[in-house]
Image: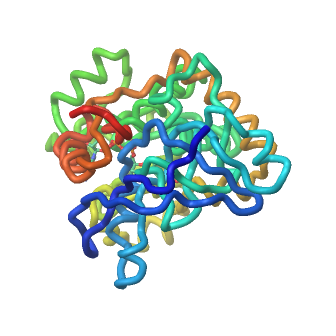
């Protein structure tokens, strides 16, 4: 395949945005790396956190956003794995701040690429790593720590939906917490058994009663801030809250009382650390499970697609209604 010298990549104009685009050199893979011609990449909350954390003139000027995506390996650096992936369609994740998935081409480590079978589309494959792998990691934790039921906050989002679906598959009752009546109705329509709306005045009481009744001793919390405090107080004795995101944007406000007096536990979760701590074999095993699940159970809704040149509009569309589904950046997409 002919590799062009130049490509379009999403560009951060200044710290915090806006996102525009520019033409830059196509990067070359070093030893152990591959060059991926990108097919699609989602806008995830972790991308927005990453974009907001980039500062300093040098860092901003070279930064190319995008953590996960899919594409085809078209060039390989030295090494067995890069050679093995040559010509393959892969789900991939970025490792260099100046080479993200929101570009026509990305250089990344071959060990951050995973072949996708024909049965999985480029679009679904572009979202294979972050959310499905996290959902599976949570069920590993649920089994390992012997939790009988789980509380799933931000349940109407992509990952929240996966946790609900896997709960059903594994016979683990899931208490789904949503923000409003519309989300609540949608989840019930989709077959959710336990749905609580956190804008109801009696929400905390309902949560306390239901988590006791079902012995829900684990809460998965991507909202954090005062929400975490509320969960810690409502859960049964000895329960655990895992914080894995900061959708509230506040991220503070937990007091020590439930931790000290009620033997409750507060943990953090970050997928990259979990994958590192659990080793390559477990990661490969979970990836195989994800491939199976994506074929049927875990299909992720896509609400819209934008070309790289419209990255800011893509982000604004996503933030306007996260629950409506993922927004994808697709090189060459007409929009
Ligand atoms: N730690 C890790 O390794 C890891 C891995 C994967 C994902 N995550 C985290 O998981 C979270 C969910 O990701 P996703 O891809 O599923 O996102 P998503 O599909 O965009 O869904 C986000 C959901 O959260 C809701 N939401 C937004 N702000 C909220 C708030 N302040 N309080 C309650 N609900 C709120 C949204 O509702 P509206 O549409 O009404 O706003 C939407 O239903 C993110 O925080 C992400 O960073 C972490």
Q: Nearer the viewer, residue 283 or 114?
A: 114
The residue shown at (53%, 31%) is 125
Instruction: Tell me if 168 is positioned left or right of 323 in this view.
Output: right
Image coordinates for residue 292, horizontal then vertical, percent: 63, 21
Task: Say which of 83 and 287 sits in front.
Answer: 83
Q: Where is residue 102? Give x, y as percent.
A: 41, 51
Q: In this view of the protein, which residue sits in the foreground, 128 or 185?
A: 128
Q: Nearer the viewer, residue 216 or 187?
A: 187
Q: Which quarter of the figure is the N terminus placed in?
A: top right
Q: Seen in the image, is 186 located left or right of residue 133?
A: left
Q: Can residue 215 be seen from the camera position used here?
A: no
Locate the C terminus by quadrant: top left
- Asked if residue 110 can be seen in this view, the reply is yes
Which residue extends farthest right?
80
Residue 184 on image: x %, y %: 23, 28
Relative to 119, is 162 above or below? below
Q: Residue at x 31, y 34 (%)?
A: 333
Residue 255 occupies which quadrant of the picture?
A: bottom left
The color scheme shown is rainbow
The percent coordinates of residue 19 (x first, y second) are: 25, 60
* Residue found at x 58% / y 34%: 148
Would you place residue 39 above or below residue 275 in this image? Answer: above
Residue 61 shown left or right of residue 68 in the figure: left
Q: What is the tally of numbered marks visible in this picture? A: 0
Q: Residue at x 52, y 46 (%)?
A: 218
């Amino acid at each position: 395949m002919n590799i062009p010298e130049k490509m379009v990549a999403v560009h951060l104009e200044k710290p915090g945005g806006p996102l525009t685009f520019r033409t830059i050199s196509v990067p070359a893979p070093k030893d152990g790396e591959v060059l991926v011609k990108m097919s699609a990449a989602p806008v995830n909350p972790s991308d927005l956190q990453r974009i907001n954390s980039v500062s300093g003139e040098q860092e901003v000027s070279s930064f190319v956003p995008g953590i996960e995506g899919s594409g085809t390996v078209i060039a390989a650096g030295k090494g067995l794995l890069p050679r093995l992936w040559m010509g393959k369609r892969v789900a991939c994740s970025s490792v260099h701040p100046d080479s993200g998935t929101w570009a026509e081409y990305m250089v990344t480590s071959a060990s951050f690429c995973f072949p996708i079978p024909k049965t999985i589309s480029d679009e679904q494959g572009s979202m294979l790593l972050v959310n499905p792998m996290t959902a599976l990691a949570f069920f590993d934790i649920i089994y390992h720590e012997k939790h009988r039921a789980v509380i799933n906050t931000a349940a109407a989002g992509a990952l929240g939906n996966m946790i609900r679906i896997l709960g059903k598959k594994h016979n683990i009752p899931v208490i789904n917490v949503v923000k409003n009546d519309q989300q609540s109705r949608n989840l019930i329509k989709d077959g959710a058994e336990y749905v609580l709306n956190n804008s109801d005045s009696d929400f905390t009481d309902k949560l306390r009663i239901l988590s006791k009744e079902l012995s829900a001793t684990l809460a998965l919390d991507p909202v954090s801030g005062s929400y975490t405090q509320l969960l810690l107080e409502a859960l049964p004795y000895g329960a655990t809250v895992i914080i894995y995101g900061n959708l509230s944007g506040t991220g503070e406000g937990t007091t020590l009382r439930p931790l000290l007096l009620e033997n409750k536990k507060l943990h953090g979760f970050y997928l990259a650390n979990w994958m590192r701590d659990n080793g390559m074999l477990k990661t490969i095993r979970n990836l195989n499970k994800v491939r199976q699940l994506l074929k049927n159970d875990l299909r992720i809704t896509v609400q819209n697609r934008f070309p790289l040149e419209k990255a800011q509009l893509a982000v604004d569309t996503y933030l306007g209604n996260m629950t409506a589904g993922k927004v994808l950046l697709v090189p060459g997409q007409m929009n």
